[in-house]
């Protein structure tokens, strides 16, 4: 791949004497020892290969057109998309995430391969267009040739090193995530072909240098020159090198041409599909699921062609790297889910169906392409998507299959109970709506009814803070914070229902629409400036998904006759906040009077999936914790690498046979893997679902005597109470500040 590229129009005829080569300007004979007939055969093969390649690429992209329409405009602002994708791919930024070795390895392979491809293209242009077609003098000589040779040798060397690193990790280390259900001989063929192309190019280059008498200028090709010296030291004569060159040149050329023809039909196609996948990615993928058409049948998964063209492209873009599998909390806890296998199972079924090798069968069902319990296992935490270097949107495909299961009634009985509670009572607990605000009875002030009075913040409290005893304490803490800071806020009382975020991810699209429609109608009857949510799940769906729903589509639906006047849409720009964002601003403005000395606990903080990975809110809760004076220690898996509590995607309501529970594993990590170790006193959360899961994990994992679960709001109230007590006792030790 280094020395066999098509090009070099000024190269001497076959059999040119070495002495003549020494006397000419620096260049090289591309077809040295290859006859004119051989050259013609090579061009004929190259043309055939390009046709095979082009047909294969066409067939791949034609297949995407048989997929369903994607709801998002993924080609809008295409030049900007291509530029951003080029930056992401060329920088290898996603490859370096979590795995430095893989990042260096892939960067070497990618940069080296692209350099060799560009170098081949330059030679082809010089020989076939610039000189033969346009009749110009070749530029492949002199300083250009010397610079070209140096760059090609250097970058080709990186390519070989990168491929060797891949071979070492795959076969010597046998890295766990590289081996799995879909590991095949195709993977072996791909990596070994790359290695043989890289090393073979240097061998051919070395034979040419040795056979042409070691031209001095060829020292710029330092790898090939060194290898030529090794051959010479081993006793190889110039004649022997010339004889071996012919066989080596053809072997190398046929391997390279075969590889090009193979690209569209096997794993190497990811070099094209992965870039296309990054170009067409949705920056809000996961945090907003694909839109909801009036005909809900079109969002299910009855057949493989129900998947959108982007979801089919996702399948082709998968490189089997296993990054998604290695971070999946469902897989880690023993649930029957491997994100990589799901994507590749769908791809294998599609390809087998297209080839007539299998009969049609259900996409998701017991005995189907994907087992029902596999999809039930997903926590919708987006860890797989965050880890994927080629921007595969797993959650879109997973939710599509969950919709199919839900429509067929093939969900756990616990989830059926939740759906029933929502339809009858509007909450997941099945409690009367009139009791929704009973949590506020213990407050020493009255809450404003946002339906009757104008407020700055419409506070969506949420199901668990309203009905769950443990989370009611969090709601009271937050209400107290707002009251003490003088925030104008109100709630909806019994007009508040479940937000719908998690049942949507379980697949209950129709009920989600009803709940969202109810809230939109209720919001229209209130006067407020902003929405603030207790639960990151509510925050996500109201911020990212409610604006995506075109309720006008359902205006004539007798089941969902929304009175919708375009108030809630993307253009309305109603700000939606998680409570921590509001309170952090209050702390920064000094409206709570903290000085950072109130508490001295040693704590760690868990990033909720819907606040962190979904919406990139990482530092705000940490800033609040630090403002209380607590000593914050990070767990190894934090921020975007955070490990899900297990409550997302309906996990809060389902039963699984898992060991250990995600919540138990996370608490163990807090006590054993932080640099503070067992000295950690409090495990701080910012999500009601996380609170519920970790309180359960504290009991089942026998951590009750070791650590306390607290919400950031509770920690802040304790700090304010400590501040008040200190002030009342006349012990105001607040540090002096300079004017």
Image (spheres, rainbow, N blue to C red):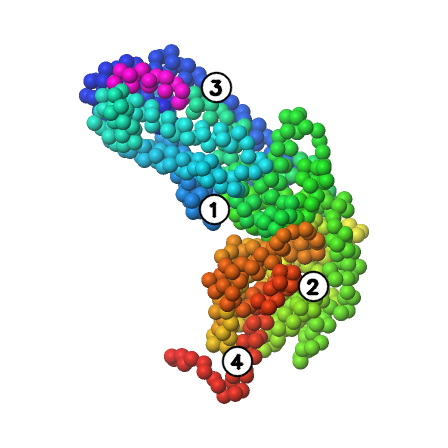
Q: Which of pointers 4 and 2 lies earlier in the amino acid sequence?
A: 2
Q: Position of residue 354 (x, y in %)?
A: 64, 28
Q: Is residue 245 magenta?
A: yes
Instruction: Name the secondary structure under disc 3.
Output: helix
Q: CA distance from mark 4 to mark 2?
A: 31 Å
Question: In the displayed structure, would residue 729 be above or below residue 115?
Answer: below
User: Residue under circle 1?
Assistant: 94
Q: Which of pointers 2 and 3 lies earlier in the amino acid sequence?
A: 3
- Contact, CB < 8 Å: mark 3 with mark 1? no
Q: Which is the main secondary structure of the residues drawn in magenta?
A: helix
Q: Which of pointers 1 and 2 lies earlier in the amino acid sequence?
A: 1
Circle 3 packing at 10 Å, graded few (<14), some (14-19), many (20+), is some
Taking the spot 32% from the left edge, 21% from the top edge, the residue there is 30
Q: Which of pointers 3 and 1 lies earlier in the amino acid sequence?
A: 3
Q: Is residue 34 magenta?
A: no
Circle 1 packing at 10 Å, graded few (<14), some (14-19), many (20+), is some
């Amino acid at each position: 791949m280094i020395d066999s590229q098509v090009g070099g129009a000024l190269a001497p005829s076959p059999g040119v004497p070495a002495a003549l080569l020494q006397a000419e300007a620096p260049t090289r004979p591309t077809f040295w020892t290859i006859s004119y007939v051989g050259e013609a055969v090579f061009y004929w093969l190259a043309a055939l290969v390009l046709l095979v390649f082009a047909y294969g690429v066409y067939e791949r992209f034609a297949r995407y057109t048989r997929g369903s329409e994607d709801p998002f405009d993924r080609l809008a602002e295409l030049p900007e998309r291509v530029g951003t994708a080029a930056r992401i791919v060329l920088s290898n930024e996603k490859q370096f995430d979590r795995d430095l070795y893989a990042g260096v390895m892939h960067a070497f392979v990618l940069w080296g391969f692209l350099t060799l491809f560009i170098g081949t293209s330059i030679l082809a242009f010089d020989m076939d267009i610039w000189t033969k077609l346009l009749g110009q003098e070749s530029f492949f000589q002199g300083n250009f040739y010397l610079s070209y040779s140096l760059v090609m040798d250097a970058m080709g060397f990186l390519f070989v090193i990168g491929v060797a690193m891949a071979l070492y990790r795959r076969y010597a280390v046998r890295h766990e995530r590289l081996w799995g259900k879909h590991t095949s001989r195709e993977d072996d063929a791909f990596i070994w072909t790359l290695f043989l192309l890289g090393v073979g190019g240097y061998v051919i280059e070395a034979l040419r240098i040795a056979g042409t008498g070691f031209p001095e200028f060829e020292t710029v090709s330092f790898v090939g020159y060194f290898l030529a010296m090794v051959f010479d030291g081993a006793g190889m004569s110039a004649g022997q090198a010339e004889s071996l060159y012919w066989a080596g040149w053809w072997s190398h050329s046929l391997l390279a041409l075969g590889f090009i023809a193979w690209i569209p039909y096997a794993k190497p196609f990811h070099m094209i599909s992965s870039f296309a996948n990054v170009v067409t990615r949705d920056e809000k993928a996961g945090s907003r699921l694909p839109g909801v058409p009036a005909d809900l049948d079109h969002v299910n998964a009855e057949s493989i062609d129900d998947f959108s063209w982007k979801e089919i492209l996702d399948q082709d873009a998968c490189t089997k790297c296993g990054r998604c599998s290695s971070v999946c909390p469902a897989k880690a806890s023993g649930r029957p889910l491997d994100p990589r296998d799901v994507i590749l199972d769908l791809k294998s079924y599609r390809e087998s169906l297209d080839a007539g090798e299998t009969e049609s069968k259900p996409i998701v069902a017991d005995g189907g392409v994907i087992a029902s319990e596999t999809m039930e296992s997903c926590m919708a935490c987006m860890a797989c998507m965050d880890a994927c270097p080629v921007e595969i949107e797993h959650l879109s495909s997973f939710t599509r299959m969950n919709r199919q299961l839900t429509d067929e009634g093939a969900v756990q009985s616990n989830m059926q109970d939740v759906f029933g509670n929502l339809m009858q009572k509007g909450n997941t607990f099945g409690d009367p709506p009139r009791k929704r605000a009973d949590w506020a009875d213990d407050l020493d002030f009255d809450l404003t009814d946002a339906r009757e009075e104008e407020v700055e913040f419409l506070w969506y409290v949420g199901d668990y803070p309203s009905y769950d005893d443990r989370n009611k304490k969090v709601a009271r803490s937050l209400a107290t914070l707002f009251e003490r800071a003088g925030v104008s806020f109100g709630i909806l009382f019994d007009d508040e229902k479940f937000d719908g975020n998690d049942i949507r991810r379980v697949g209950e699209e129709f009920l989600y629409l009803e709940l969202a429609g109810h809230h939109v109608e209720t919001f229209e009857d209130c006067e407020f400036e902003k929405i603030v949510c207790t639960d990151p799940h509510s925050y996500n769906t109201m911020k990212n998904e409610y604006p995506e729903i075109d309720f006008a589509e359902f205006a004539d639906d007798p089941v969902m006759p929304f009175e919708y006047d375009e108030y809630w849409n993307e253009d309305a720009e109603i700000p939606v906040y998680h409570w921590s964002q509001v309170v952090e601003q209050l702390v920064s403005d000094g409206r709570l009077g903290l000085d950072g000395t109130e508490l001295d606990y040693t704590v760690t903080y868990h990033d909720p999936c819907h606040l962190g990975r979904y919406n990139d809110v990482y530092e705000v809760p940490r800033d609040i914790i630090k403002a209380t004076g607590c000593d914050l220690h990070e767990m190894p898996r934090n921020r975007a690498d955070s490990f899900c509590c297990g409550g997302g995607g309906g996990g809060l309501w389902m039963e699984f046979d898992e060991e250990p529970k995600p919540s138990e594993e996370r608490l163990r990590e807090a006590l054993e893997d932080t640099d503070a170790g067992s000295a950690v006193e409090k495990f701080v959360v910012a999500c009601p679902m996380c609170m519920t899961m970790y309180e359960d994990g504290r009991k089942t994992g026998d951590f009750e005597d070791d650590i306390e679960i607290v919400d950031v709001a509770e920690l802040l109230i304790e700090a304010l109470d400590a501040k008040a007590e200190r002030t009342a006792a006349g012990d105001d030790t607040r540090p002096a500040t300079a004017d």
